[in-house]
Amino acid sequence: MPEVYDPLTDPAPAHDVRAVLRIRAFRRLWVAFGLSSLGDWIGLLALTAMAKSFAGDDYQAANFAIGGVLFLRVLPALVMGPVAGWVADRLDRRWTMILGDLIRAAFFVTIPLVGTLTWLLVATVLIEIVSLVWGPAKDASVPNLVPRHRLEAANQISLITTYGTALPAAVIFTAITLVTRWAGDFSIDLAVYVNAATFVVSAIAIVSVAEIGRAIHDHEDHPTLWRTMVEGWSYVTGTPVVRGLVVGISGAFAAGAVVIGLGRTYVEDLGAGDPGYGVLFGAVFGGLALGMGFAPRLFSGLSRRRLFSAGLVGSGICLAALALIQQIEIATMIAILLGFCAGASWVSGYTLLGLEVPDAVRGRTFAFVQSAVRTVLAVTLAIAPFAAGAIGRNTWTIGGESVTYNGASMTMLIAAIVAGVIGLIAWRQMDDRPGVPFWRDLRRSFGKTPGVYPTTGLFIAMEGGDGAGKSTQSALLMEWLKAQGHQVVMTRQPGATDVGKTLRQIVLDPATGDISHRTEALIYAADKAEHVDSVIKPALKAGAVVITDRYVDSALAYQGSGRDLDLSDVERVNRWATDDLRPNLTILLDLPPKSGLDRFTERDRIEAQSHDFHVRVRNAFLELAAAEPQHYLVIDATQDREAIAEQIRARLQPMLPKVDL
């Protein structure tokens, strides 16, 4: 018999995409919603092209028809969104998705058969209403198909599939319109029929996913739409970071909506026709998928706040370039870059919302964000084509040369300026590393790896300057964890192993005197290598909670910033020494150097360094924490030790592994 795959015992890392796709039920659902997403994008391209065909050669009428289709695709979400979610929660999810796919396929088939703009607009609304029920049913099913520790990777696959299928949809649409160009309007009809076929195949795929069923309700609280909106609005407006995120995310969506809303007439102005529209559409969404999939890893050295704001500013710059360029080949390359910048902002913004918003108000805040984004999309999709139509075709003569810039390009240019201003405002509100030059941050971000985070046990590092209270808090934390039934290993660097004790004596004893800074860095790295291999890794593999007093951050702060060594060299050596193993959480006890050092009557070789040295060390710790706030807890160490301990426990509680009773 073939081996049965057990996702709970799969040793692959939690973020391994292949491990998620080995889960049969999720894999089949993924195929289904991938086909549905593909059909959705082909439908968008075909319906906007068909709307222009129905409108004829009139420039304004064509823009108004396309704007109507795009606006009506978003309008049902504003009116029916909460109702559709309520319906999806009360029906059998599998049959909801099967019937939803078949109904959408039927509606698409009728559009070319009826052949009028009025029915196209009516069918668009009906299709979107069905999609509003289908989407929540799919999203609610995913957590029931994958283990909890695989859920984040499953959601990432879903997100990339949803937007990444725009690229093959554009390729299919372009191929159909090129191959069947001789058939005239029938080429667009054929694209609609291909779209309908994808929904039928999706329905067939979902039939085989028997694990999807009806939602279970245990006295759930379903707040009204008004209550959800009011509470979400109150939290967003009262929290500067979240307010900046919402404004920025809305701006990113608005920039993308301008391109989609004006893309058809923009490529017509360039003489590229339907194939050019498909290429431009695919370029934007292909870039969006690349940005969401690779930007966080490519720019891992940038904090998420800086990546979010930089992506917004980059989107505005690219949109301005797109408006000014009048050549389809160059415009396509710019569109890919525009999508990449928007995708980087999109994924980092939503990740920040999940990290910055407390769990008690997270659902309401996301509900508000979704409503705000849909409103912005609806307004942008409605206004942009109408503005382009109102501006019309314009030709100027400059120095004897005729220059033509039509309404689509000029509207894009206005939107680019707005997007750039929104990005700069978000930067001013959210920059978490003031005083650190952005370009230096950007250069340092290349080549960094995301690291390896333990999937068994829990790895905690206590960091901070000398005298900050790391040993005290480590002991209090160990006592609390043991009382809850956890296996705990408390250790330190340097000196936790026999080799480490000798190295500690060398590097900390004042009698050692002055040694080369590189020698000092390598001694600390040697201690870490032995410590990780002989203490930390075996304990984590056994499922223990490991608490280490100092880890790689201390080397980066003391030897990298405190000494005159290149930080990238110190990091490279220490990442290699530790096999790039990183703590699940680093607790940084922040204390002014003088306050910490005054606690010592005698000082070792490192503690005896100058005040400026320890100030550089403190600033380095804070800079490291600001770059990856999701993996850090920064605490004011001037507080009472019990108050500090309570903050540590509150942060760790949801991260702790399950205790076998």
Image (cartoon, helix red, strand yellow):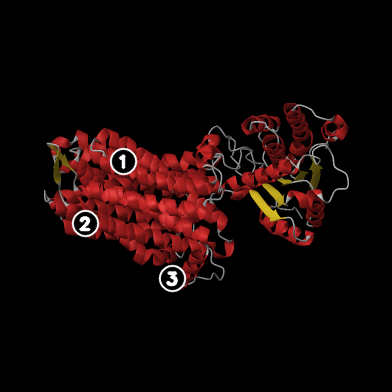
Instruction: State the residue position of label 2.
Output: 386
User: Do we see residue 342 in this rendering?
Assistant: no
Q: Is residue 157 above or below residue 240?
A: above
Expressed as whole percent of the image width and height from the top left, the position of residue 122 reads 23, 60
Q: Which mark is residue 464?
A: none
Rounded to the nearest whole Å, what is the CA distance between mark 1 and mark 2? 22 Å
Q: Nearer the viewer, residue 156 or 136?
A: 156
Q: Indicate the position of residue 590 as horizontal and vertical percent values.
A: 71, 51
Q: Residues within 10 Å of mark 2 (few under 14, many from 20)?
A: many
Q: Nearer the viewer, residue 108 or 529?
A: 529
**Amino acid type at mark 2:** Phe
Marks 2/3 in contact by CB < 8 Å: the verdict is: no
- Quadrant for the C terminus in the image: bottom right
Corner quadrant of residue 177: top left
The residue labelled by disc 3 is 225
Indicate which label's residue lies in the foreground, 1 or 2. Answer: 1
Of callouts 1 and 2, the N-terminal one? 1
Residue 361 position (above or below residue 105)? below
Is 206 in front, or is 584? 584
The residue that disc 1 covers is 321
